[in-house]
Each structure stands twice: as C-alpha cells, then as structure tokens.
Amino acid sequence: MKRYDIPSHAGTIVLDGVDLNELELQISDIERDFKVREIDITFKEEKLYDNQVRHSSDAYKFIKEVIFDGMEIQEHFVVLYMNQANRITGYYKHSKGTINSTQVDIEIITAVAIKTLSKAMIISHNHPSGNTRPSEADRRMTKRLKEAASMFDISVLDHIICTADNYYSFADNSEGSLSGPSEESVVTAMRERILQGLRQVTEANSPNIHRMIQTKEGYRKLEERILEKVLRDNRIPEAVIPQIEMEWN
C-alpha cells in the first residue's frame, strides 16, 4: 500500500527590500478601520458574602474588604451593582488614584450598570486622610451620576465615603445630591414658573384668566388649580394655562 508522503516545498516568493514588520503594521491599520469590537463585561473574583444590602453598614463592610489593602494609601472608587431585591450582583473597581483624588467616569459606570441589567448601585470611595466628610466635588459627582442613571431607571442608593475605622453615608445624612430636591423646593420652583407663565397672559389671548388674576384671591385660586394639574398630569405650566382658558371658554 502506497504511503502518503506530503512533499515539502521551499519558499517560492522572494520579497526584495520589503520590511515585513512595516507591512504588518499597514495591514493592522487597514483592519482597524473595518473591525467593530464587541464589548464584553465579565465577572471574576467571587466573594463569600451575604449579599443582601440592608443599610449603609452592610455596604461599608463589603466595600472595606474590597479596598482594604489600599485604604490608607490612595483613593479607590468602587461601585456595587444590585438587583431589584437589593442583592449585590457584582462590584466594579472603577479607578485608583492618588492620596487625595481619583478619576470618575460617569459614562462608564452607567454603561456597566446597563450592561449588567442592574436596578440600583451604591458608589463609594475612600479618604486616606481619615476624614469622612464629603467635598463639594463629591456632591457634584453624585448628583450627575444620579441624574445619568435615572435616565435608565437605575437608582443610586448611596454614596459611602470610607476610612479604615469609619464611614459617611449620603443616604443616612439625607444629602441633597443623593436624595434630590425636596417636595417643598419643587413646589416653590413650580410656583415661580407659574408666575412667569401668567405674566405672559393678556386680555386678548386669555380673557378669562386675565380677569381672574386681577385680584389676589383670584390669582391664588388659579395658581392652585394650575399647580394641581401640573403635579397630577406631569405637565408644564406653559401647557396647562392655555388648557384652562379653553375649558372656561
């Protein structure tokens, strides 16, 4: 029986004066223009933990374990991602900085939350100095992240500032950047907006409303009616005012 012998061939292509390394770089540049990479987020470093976070002390205990080694050396920014049942589905070591600062990328933090189908998150960073009080920069960043996450119905439950021995919870201290504006401040701002809208009313364009706002009592009743519609129907005063005029007509 004849044996299969695969012949060996000497190279038949001669490249004279061509730098193969340079050619490979050119090919890589061409491929880069046509390749679209898939974003992949993976889970690693499993931790044994009763992963239901009930209050800030639970979160602090977990976060302290995650960044324990560098707690007093440099700032770390960590995010806990959670499901609807307040259970930690994963954590993300977002950044590591200097002794008094670290970078925070709101777009990336929000993107990871979306990719992992998280319904809530707790953010945290440590202060190597031992001071737990938040800075104004901490508050501004928290407010921006909360606003970004809310666009996707993702809640920012807390921002915890850690030290080796203690912590500060934005939620426990009712920080406005986390809790958002109070109902009283929302109503005050809306009354101001109603006032601006009613200043545009004339006898020609809205005779009924114009007549009513000529007295303090009439203005008060009209303002309450507009405010009720704004809050109940989630509409803006500029849309409600002409609607009321049409109803009266």
Image: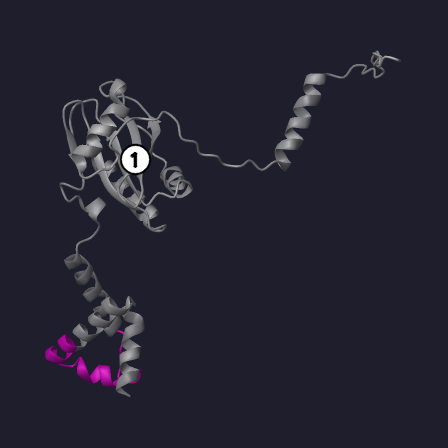
Residue 5 in which image quadrant? top right
Question: Is 97 located above or below residue 19 in the figure?
Answer: below
Is 216 positioned to the left or the right of 85 in the image?
Answer: left
| Residue marked by disc 1 | 80
Spot occupied by residue 70 in the image (x, y as percentages of width and height): 27, 19
Question: Is 45 located above or below residue 111 in the figure?
Answer: above
Whether residue 76 is visible here, answered yes or no, is yes
Spot occupied by residue 163 in the image (x, y as percentages of width and height): 18, 25
Within 10 Å of disc 1 (Cα), the crowding (few <14, some 14-19, many 20+) is many
Question: Is 156 located above or below residue 44 in the figure?
Answer: below
Most distant residue in the bottom direction: 249
Which stretch appears magenta?
A: 199-221
Q: Is residue 55 magenta?
A: no
Residue 58 in which image quadrant? top left
Question: Is 14 located above or below residue 146 in the figure?
Answer: above
Question: At 16% from the left edge and 73% from the top edge, which residue is drawn?
Answer: 224
Question: At 28% from the left edge and 84% from the top edge, which residue is drawn?
Answer: 247
Secondary structure of the residue carrying tag 1 is strand
Spot occupied by residue 87 in the image (x, y as percentages of width and height): 28, 39
Residue 32 in which image quadrant? top right
Q: Quadrant of the N terminus?
A: top right
Most distant residue in the right direction: 2
Task: Tell which of 244 and 110 is nearer to you.
Answer: 110
Q: Quadrant of the C terminus?
A: bottom left
The colour scheme of the drawn protein is one colour
Task: Tell which of 38 and 102 is nearer to you.
Answer: 38
Whether residue 133 is visible here, answered yes or no, is no
Question: At 24% from the left edge and 32% from the top edge, which residue is drawn?
Answer: 50
Most distant residue in the left direction: 217
Amino acid at dot 1: Leu
Task: Tell which of 107 and 206 is nearer to you.
Answer: 107
